[in-house]
Amino acid sequence: MKHIYLERHDPDKNLHRFYQLFVTPGIFGDWSLVREWGRAGSPGTVRKDWFDTEEEAREAGEKLKAIKEKKGYQSILAEL
């Protein structure tokens, strides 16, 4: 997983949300999972979680993706 973009829409509730995940290398040999979420069309909230290996970061991202899909988010873009 390098980049995943998810969206959830419910017009009846005026709900238009996005959630995206990136796995990126750090400068000290570590890896980060960057998460951004918010209302579609607006800048979102960003959080970084750091991991020792790329594999750990990817696994954490895949777990978050599965959780979001259970809540009704749909994958728009998934680069693995």
Image (cartoon, grey):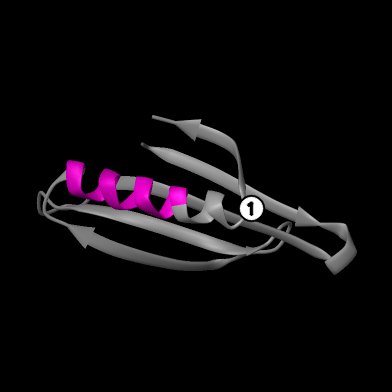
Q: Which residue is mark 1?
A: 72
Image side of residue 25 versus residue 77, left or right = left
Q: Residue at x 84, y 68 (%)?
A: 13
Residue 60 in magenta?
yes
Please tell me how crowded label 1 is: few (under 14), some (14-19), or many (20+) other residues with Cα within 10 Å.
few
- Identify the residue shown where x is 14% and y is 52%: 30
Quarter of the image with the N terminus in it:
top left
Q: Is residue 47 left or right of residue 7?
A: left
Q: Quadrant of the C terminus?
A: top left
Q: How many marks?
A: 1
**The magenta stretch spans which residues?**
55-66
**72 or 37: nearer the eye?**
72
User: Is 14 rendered above or below residue 80?
Assistant: below
Q: Secondary structure at mark 1?
A: loop
Q: Main secondary structure of the magenta part?
A: helix
| Picture quadrant where residue 77 is located | top right
Toward which corner of the image does residue 44 lie, by quadrant? bottom right
In depth, the one of 9 and 36 nearer the eye is: 9
